[in-house]
Image (tube, rainbow, N blue to C red):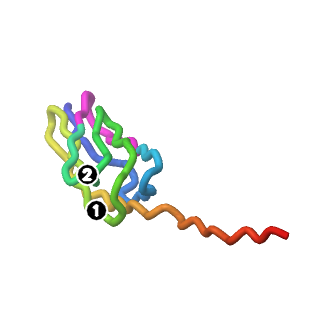
């Protein structure tokens, strides 16, 4: 009997602008399971079951995740927040 895919990956994740990002999609159900996504932030791509890249823009994006197998599909929303990098504070150098 075929089992529908059920996405089991965390649905709230964060990254940082300019820093490498890596997120693995996971699902239970009859194999093989294929994944598709829509609405990824700029700088990120899906390859197989992995979303990765270097995000270029900050903000929160609702990414649609879909897992599909011979029995059907499961669709969930990933809340993906890309934070701005910490600000660097430069102090004046006082020479004596």
Is residue 25 part of the magenta span, yes or no?
yes
Residue ranking furthest to the front = 96
In the image, taking residue 88 as reference, residue 80 lies left or right, namely: left
Q: Position of residue 82 (x, y in %)?
A: 39, 60
Mark 1 Cα-neighbour bin, 10 Å: few <14, some 14–19, many ≥20: some
Q: Give me the residue at 32% from left, 62% from top.
A: 79
Where is the C terminus found, in terms of image quarters?
bottom right
Where disc 1 sits, the SS reads strand
Q: Position of residue 32 (x, y in %)?
A: 25, 28
Of 67 and 90, nearer the camera is 90
Q: Which residues are magenta?
A: 23-34
Q: Give me the residue at 32% from left, 40% from top.
A: 28
Q: Find out whether the residues at labels 2 and 1 contact each other: C-beta distance under 8 Å.
A: yes
Q: Give me the residue at 38% from left, 62% from top.
A: 81
Residue for badge 2: 40
Q: Position of residue 69 (x, y in %)?
A: 19, 34
Where disc 2 sits, the SS reads loop
Residue ranking furthest to the right = 96
Gap in angstroms between the C-alphas marked 2 and 1:
7 Å
Mark found first going from the N terminus, 2 or 1: 2
In the image, taking residue 30 as reference, residue 70 lies left or right, namely: left
Q: Quadrant of residue 72?
A: top left
Q: Position of residue 57 (x, y in %)?
A: 33, 59
Where is the N terminus found, in terms of image quarters?
top left
Question: Relative to 94, does residue 66 appear above or below in the rendering?
Answer: above
Question: Relative to 17, does residue 44 appear above or below in the rendering?
Answer: above
Q: How many marks?
A: 2
Is residue 76 part of the magenta span, yes or no?
no
Of 73 and 46, nearer the camera is 46
| Disc number placed over residue 61 in the picture, else none | 1
């Amino acid at each position: 009997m075929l089992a529908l895919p059920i996405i089991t990956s965390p649905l709230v994740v964060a990254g940082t602008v300019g820093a490498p990002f890596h997120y693995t999609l996971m699902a239970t159900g009859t194999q093989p399971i294929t994944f598709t996504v829509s609405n990824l932030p700029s700088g990120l791509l899906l390859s197989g079951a992995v979303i990765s890249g270097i995000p270029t823009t900050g903000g929160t994006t609702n990414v649609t995740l879909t897992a599909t197998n011979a029995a059907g599909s499961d669709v969930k929303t990933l809340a993906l927040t890309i934070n701005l990098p910490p600000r660097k504070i430069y102090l004046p150098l006082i020479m004596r």
